[in-house]
Image: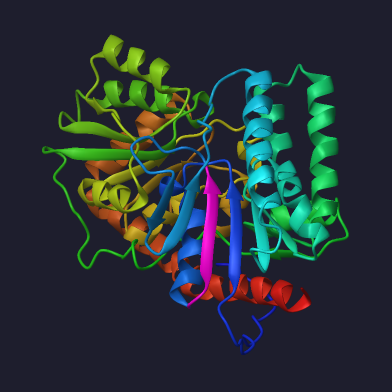
Amino acid sequence: MTLPVTEIPAPALPQRTRPLRVGMVVVSEYESDPRVRRQAEALVARGDEVTVLALDAPGRPEVDIVDGVRVVHLPTRKYRGSSAKAYLSLYGGFGARAAAWLSRRPRAFDVVQAHSMPEALVFAAAVPRLFGVPVLLDVHDLTSKLFASKFADRRRVLAAVSASEKASLRFAREVLTVHEPYADMLRDLTRRPVSVVMNCPDERLFVPREQPRGWSPDGEVVFSYHGLIAPRHGLVAATEALAAIRGEVPGARLQVRGSGDGLDELRQRVEALGADVDLPTRLYPLPEIVAELGRVHIGLVPSQLDPWTDGVLPTKLLEYASLGIPVITFRNPVIARYFPEDSVRYVDPATPQTLAVAMRDLAMNPDKALAQARRATQVMAELRWSEQKKHYFAVIDRLAKRA
């Protein structure tokens, strides 16, 4: 049984005399960030003007227009690694540059939206806030959960991050987040209104397949992973599972698309095992990711359960389900809340052994796998971006009206 997306219908959108001007700030590569792009492009499509301050993107101009969205690439590069100091330096450096940019344009926007991580990015909008511009904090993931996962022994750092998180939530006029369990957690931390706009794929890009992409167990079977490549996301385990089933599924291969600090370790393991894994050589913008998924048979979400992954609803899972691709996934309370047992193949936990069993089973039984995918697509029928964006518009319009 699928839970309703929200219990409160989105209010009718008010009439406006001019387009809204919305500024966004995100410590991410805009071109490959699906949530930020969905929101920005939805605003532009209805006639608003959107400027996004984002990380530097190699090969892209400093100021770019991407599908109608003005993107300003600040001179800061992404860091993914195991240094708490480097993360704080990245966040602080980008936040300072974004704050300087916004302070020179204090009345440029009707609403400023900061996307976490980190939550403290809302303070980049301090000067516009002094001029009466409402600030929205969009919590994709909680920084405290990331640091608890990566730096569990750094108690002072964890305490500082937690304090910063609470201050940021109180600084924002309103808070947005990705699902109800996160919203419940955030409501305990702040008295600010907290709304939910789920990370549902944009139907313009993630169109369900008219015909399921079947396969023969004796032929090529393409497994897929796309997104952040980090040790906690289990790609080494998936590679070991792939190597274990090659005797029974000789055409099994794994396509990986994404970037992250786990790529070097993954490459070394692939080479050691001689596994048939297609690793990324560059950053893929979102439309190209959709095209890459066109050749995929089975999706993998093989993350390890930890303080970070315990509360996530992976976007890649929703994207596979939208496209009609069977999925093998780890289990956490949020995923289990939305996806029944017969709609995905759960592995508890995602180890090389459990992944090998699940991968072999679905590869050898395509009819079973595709029936599972059809049920997951039915789940996604109630989680449409065309509905979610109405709730997003309502939040933006409410804030602009208050301003």
Classified by dominant secondary structure, the portion drawn in magenta counts as strand
From what the image shows, is residue 389 above or below residue 150?
Answer: below
Q: Which residues are magenta?
A: 47-54
Tell me which residue sits at (39%, 17%) in the image. Answer: 264
Residue 144 location, x and y as percent? 73, 35
**On the rendered image, what quadrant is the N terminus found in?**
bottom right
For the image, the number of numbered tags is 0
Q: Is residue 174 left or right of residue 235?
A: right
Residue 246 location, x and y as percent? 21, 25
Q: In the picture, residue 176 is in which quadrant?
A: bottom right
Tell me which residue sits at (36%, 32%) in the image. Answer: 357
Q: Is residue 372 left or right of residue 137?
A: left
- Residue placed farthest to the front in the image? 104
Tell me which residue sits at (66%, 76%) in the image. Answer: 397
Q: Is residue 267 left or right of residue 149?
A: left
Query: Is any part of residue 65 visible from this angle?
Result: yes
Tell me which residue sits at (80%, 62%) in the image. Answer: 131
Q: In the picture, residue 177 is in which quadrant?
A: bottom right
Query: Is any part of residue 384 visible from this angle?
Result: no
- Residue placed farthest to the top in the image? 272
Residue 237 location, x and y as percent? 42, 24
Q: Is residue 184 left or right of residue 284?
A: right
From what the image shows, is residue 336 above or below residue 131?
Answer: above
